[in-house]
Amino acid sequence: MTDITDLTVAEIRDGFRAGDFSAREVASAFNANVATAKALNAFIVETPDSALAAADAADAARAAGDLKPLSGVPIGMKDLFCTQGVQTTAASHMLEGFVPTYESTVSGKLWAAGAGMLGKLNLDQFAMGSSNETSYYGNVISPWRRNDGGNAALAPGGSSGGSSSAIAARLCPAATGTDTGGSIRQPAAFTGISGIKPTYGRCSRWGIVAFASSLDQAGPMARTVRDNALLLEVMAGFDPKDSTSLDLAVPQWEANLSSDLRGKTVGIPREYRPDGLNAEIAALWDQGIAWLKDAGATVVDVSLPHTKYALPTYYIIAPAEASSNLARYDGVRYGQRDLPDGAGLQDMYAATRAAGFGPEVKRRIMIGTYVLSAGFYDAYYTQAQKVRALIARDFEQAFEQCDLLLTPTAPSAAFTLGEKQADPLAMYLNDVFTVPASLAGLPAMSVPGGLDAAGLPLGLQIIGKALDEQTVLNAGLAIEERAGFVARPDKWW
Amino acid sequence: MSIDLQTVKKIASLSRISVTDAEAEAMVPELNNILGWVEQLGEVDVTGVQPMTAVIPNHQRLRDDVVTDGNVRDKVLANAPQAEHGFFAVPKVIE
């Protein structure tokens, strides 16, 4: 019999319904993989009992003829989602020991749909990072290795690096991610899996530890486009507890999946092909264009003239919002408190935050504080919000000529841990292709396209019109069918 | 424009993050590097452009003016580093 942990979410769901296996068998198989993969450091907290309890409930539901959309499916939960009764840290020391008394809307929807939790997945601290090297709980290691015989530890991408590593290593069939500037798409690309950031407002942000509220979006990560579609259907939906939640019905993305792209026009933004673009990435992009043509799409060149300003815009807006959001960590209401002898209240705040935040989080809070401070607000923040409007307008104008955009997901394959640690700017530049869609709130997805010469996965990004996740998923499916990506990391952990 | 050690210390103070002199010194080139890079936005012509306020057009909802929550004091206090007599406790602020 096939190893259950090689099955996709849809295969687990359908096989469980058909009686091929019990939910307990599924949960036990994944629990066993989680338990033996400590070397990847993908989980901050493992919850095997929770997975088994959900499985037993699913087995009982099947016997009673009361199946739910995700009955029998265990998943991993990024440790940025508040989970009632289970420690939620955002990979920070600040929130070590924080046990929420409530459940995030998105995780609650997944549990209500029958899914079980295998554990809380590691990430970059407060979701700030592109390599999962800023976690207080240690680096996540990618299961992938270069084919040169070396065993250099590679970045699983970030910030959803625990999610990407765990899925690629078959520790869970799917996981939640969050994406502020590429934190679902870039880790998916680095590990040869798929992930979608929906339109801003599709998924409720309630109960997700906030980073940059005008950018943060939850989304699924899994090995197939179909799995992303069916998980997003469960995660999305209006929530009155999030003032930016969109009051719209959730489309039937899975049922409407179609890789027939006849009648669709794909735009290729020329600004995403800078001089010096990695030749293998450029070649894969050309291959992706050919695949979409083969699926029936027409291809046109488009221009997004303000692309080069997206990253600096992002690195004003995201830190500004972070400095405001993270002001809540004051050592009073939750999380760590550091109270030096004889310290007053102000000293307690400063000591608590110095001890509770890692270097990258402090750096971003301070940049955000600076760009919002008196005398600099207009020069930095207001200017950035104006440029952001121009970036969004670029997309609107491009979408007058096309229905979706195809680009690379990241400018390189996974890099070695430590390689970019010394230079924050070099790390930021890794998000060059993912940040623009985030600034414009557009749905965007990464799907694996192939391997580079070193045997590492490369991803293609599809960006769609606002609310048109269906076209994004359909194009993703067209690529998936043609790429035939079946590579997987050899087990060394 | 570049920032100096005094400015870094002021930002740290505004951010309520205590830093040692050595940490502040190390941050001077780091923050200047990042701020110098984002300053390229100044070259963009934004004449007549309104700053973005919402990426997806959405209306502000008003909910009914009724109580929807409450009576959860113990839950609210459950994660407090120090809670006493049903309140958050902090170091004395008034002598």
Image (cartoon, rainbow, N blue to C red):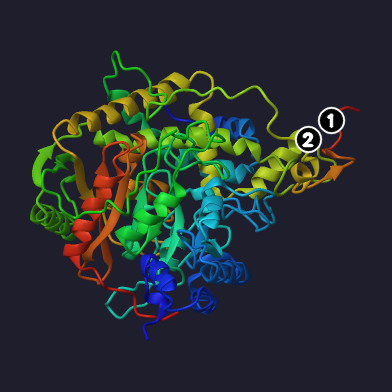
**Total number of numbered labels?**
2
Pointer 1 chain: B
Which residue is labeled 2 in the image?
Answer: A345
Three-letter code, disc 2: Leu
Pointer 2 chain: A
- Depth check: give the residue in front, A108 or A482: A108
Helix, strand or loop at disc 1? Answer: loop
- Depth check: give the residue in front, B25 or A440: A440
The image quarter containing residue A392 is top left
Whether residue A282 appears in this view of the structure is yes
Which residue is labeled 1 in the image?
Answer: B93
Q: Position of residue A53 (x, y in %)?
A: 61, 69
Q: Position of residue A433 (x, y in %)?
A: 28, 46
Residue for point 67% across, 49% down: A355
The image quarter containing residue B14 is top right
Mark 1 Cα-neighbour bin, 10 Å: few <14, some 14–19, many ≥20: few
Residue A166 tag number: none
Three-letter code, disc 1: Val
Is residue A371 depicted above or below A71 in this figure? above
Mark 2 Cα-neighbour bin, 10 Å: few <14, some 14–19, many ≥20: some
Is residue A84 depicted above or below A437 in this figure? below
Q: Position of residue B62 (x, y in %)?
A: 55, 22
Helix, strand or loop at disc 2? Answer: helix
Residue for point 64% across, 39% down: B17
Q: Position of residue A319 (x, y in %)?
A: 48, 37
Residue for point 65% across, 37% down: A328
Q: Are marks 1 and 2 in contact (CB under 8 Å)?
A: yes
Q: Is residue A137 left or right of residue A194?
A: right
Q: Which residue is the extreme one toward the front? A: A65
Is residue A226 depicted above or below A354 in this figure? below
Rounded to the nearest whole Å, what is the CA distance between mark 1 and mark 2? 6 Å
Q: Quadrant of the C terminus of chain A?
A: bottom left
